[in-house]
Amino acid sequence: MEYKSIAIDGPSGAGKSTMAKALAARLGFLYVDTGAIYRTLGLFARNSGADPGDWRQVEPLLAGVSIRMDYAGDGLQHMYLGDEDVTEAIRRPEISDAASKISAIPEVRTFLMEMQRDMARRHHVVMDGRDIGTVVLPEADLKIFLTASTQERARRRCAELQQRGTPVDYETVLADIIERDDRDSNRAAAPLRQAEDAIPVDTSGKSLEESLRILLQVVEERFS
């Protein structure tokens, strides 16, 4: 059986996870949050006392880490570090920062890439991240580059953190997003960029349902 793959890339806070999850549910595809994989490794590095941005400290940890995804029970993607479900723990702001730093290490990307590609070989997937269409799944059936203004992304991130019970002020979040955009776009290993054949979708000022309608229209036009 030939499986379909949809790659959704874009900067931090663009709504990739929310939109990819909603799109996968509507299509009956498996949603793969690749950022959660890097967050889990970032959490492991921090727990081990390593600097997530220093490859000399991170690379030796790779041989001893156990990361897996599980969709059993509620059908949502749960991340496990060893036997511990860390799905909620990896959403803390400091883990987001660790994930951004650790994802710039080439050895880390190579280590985790096969896990991501294997999911696409075995399922219809909607996979989101920052280099899915350019590096992880360059032959994806559909590539979408999702973005929104910096200010809009900061507002959304603040609302998400507030909902999770870990509020952070707007200016701090805005500065973090600007710094992360620069880091993700200028890193040597798989920098954030729009694939040449990706369809750009700007969700600034649009509701979740409005944005989802746009994505569904893009999918229909491509797969019809």
Image (cartoon, rainbow, N blue to C red):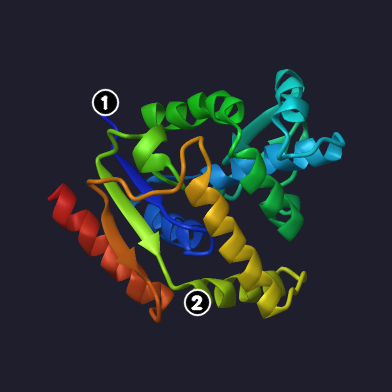
Name the residue furthest left. Answer: 224
- The answer, for residue 6, to whether it is visible in the render is yes
Q: Which residue is mark 2?
A: 152
Residue at coordinates 46% horizontally, 47% vertically from top-left? 130
Please state, as top left, top right, bottom left or bottom right, where the N terminus lies in the image. top left
Which amino acid does the dot numbered 2 rest on? Glu
Which amino acid does the dot numbered 1 rest on? Met
Q: Is residue 192 above or below residue 50?
A: below
What x and y, as percent, mark residue 32? Answer: 48, 43
- Residue 201 lies left or right of residue 94; in this view the side is left
Q: Is residue 211 above or below residue 124?
A: below
Q: Is residue 28 above or below residue 189?
A: below
Name the residue furthest bottom. Answer: 205
What x and y, as percent, mark residue 166? Answer: 77, 69
Residue at coordinates 62% horizontally, 40% vertically from top-left? 38
Q: Residues within 10 Å of mark 2 (few under 14, many from 20)?
A: some
Q: Which residue is mark 1?
A: 1
